[in-house]
Image (cartoon, rainbow, N blue to C red):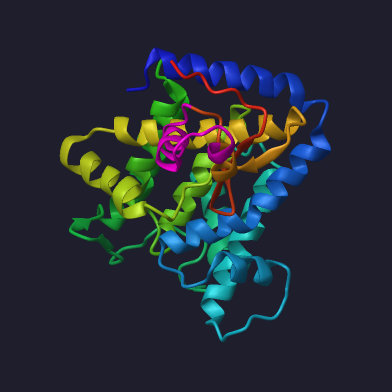
Amino acid sequence: MITQTKKENLSRLKLEYEQLRGLHNDLLKMITESELPEMVYNSNAIENSTLTLKETEKILLAQALMREVSLRETYEATNLARVIKYLWTRPNYELTVENLELLHQMLLGGINDDYAGRIRRAGEYVRVGSHIAPAPEQVRFLLESLIHQYNSEDDEYFLEKIAEFHLQFETIHPFCDGNGRMGRLIINLQFAALGYPPVIIQNKGKREDYYPIFDEWRDKRKSSRFADYLYLALSESLNKRLAYLRGNEIIKLSEYAKSNHITATTITNAAKRQTVPAFRREGVWRIAKNYVRNKA
């Protein structure tokens, strides 16, 4: 459950973001474009891609790598980047089964053309760990029902709606391949429709922070843990953009800790809890140099 304090914090951050964004559209575009390799790297790494962040960046820039990598991993990087950029220009992209199939075609085209662009057919069962996804014959109905439910429920807080949608989507597992990447694309599609910036679901810590939410959902039908996870990711994304939009000098969190005589553990934990406006860039925590921390 998202607390009232967290709701108010997001509202405050979004209000300032909306006030500043219209004056700095080019800067915001640069920030989002600079995040593309991180978005692609993290989402693919969650699915066990062996590419590093630097290798992903080089692939997206069509630069040579220092080692041989599989053609599949190269396509996974370029295809996912193409879908992300496609959605950047369509912030109100309609959430329908047909549109998800189109995105899936773009995602898996050239990787597995037998599965690309379609939901599972008769005889195509999938398992994730101990979870066996619903029978193929049920998938279209379940997916249409999920989308209809998401679009119909206006009384539930948006983070809780998006969290529950993601967990149900991954439980349905509508495609033979690419469900995790599709689910994370949908999260940012949903945020964009509400006027929020994209978030990055981090590969680092996935076994402690991301994977367990699915077990909790399947065992107890609880989505609050993932709603809180999304709160942290969205707060971090907003804090990052606001730091740049305000014109702040940005330094590494370790430098901030040293200058302000704070232990690295203390300030890093505060960053992870988003009780300070810190954010990650290329996996390194950063913060505005002039931020004054409340010591209370």
- In the depicted structure, whether residue 225 falls above or below residue 179: above
Q: Quadrant of residue 189?
A: top right
Q: Give how far across and how far down residue 85 sits, in percent.
A: 68, 52
Residue 37 position (above or below residue 160):
below
Q: Residue at x 40, y 19 (%)?
A: 156
Residue 279 seen in the figure: no
Query: Does residue 272 belong to the magenta stretch?
Result: yes
* 73 relative to 88, above or below: below
Q: Is residue 222 magenta?
A: no
Q: Give the residue displayed 64% in from the left and 80% down from the top.
A: 65
Residue 177 lies in quadrant? bottom left
Which contiguous range is marked in magenta? 257-275
Tell me: 126 left or right of 283: left
Q: Position of residue 293 (x, y in %)?
A: 54, 23
- Is most of the magenta stretch helix, strand or loop? helix
Q: Position of residue 125 (x, y in %)?
A: 27, 63
Front in this rendered view, residue 248 or 19 = 248
Q: Quadrant of the C terminus?
A: top left
Percent coordinates x, y for residue 34 in the rendering: 70, 51
Residue 262 seen from this side: yes
Q: Nearer the viewer, residue 282 or 227?
A: 282
Left or right: 227 in relation to 20 = left
Left or right, 156 with respect to 53, comes to left
Q: How many marks?
A: 0
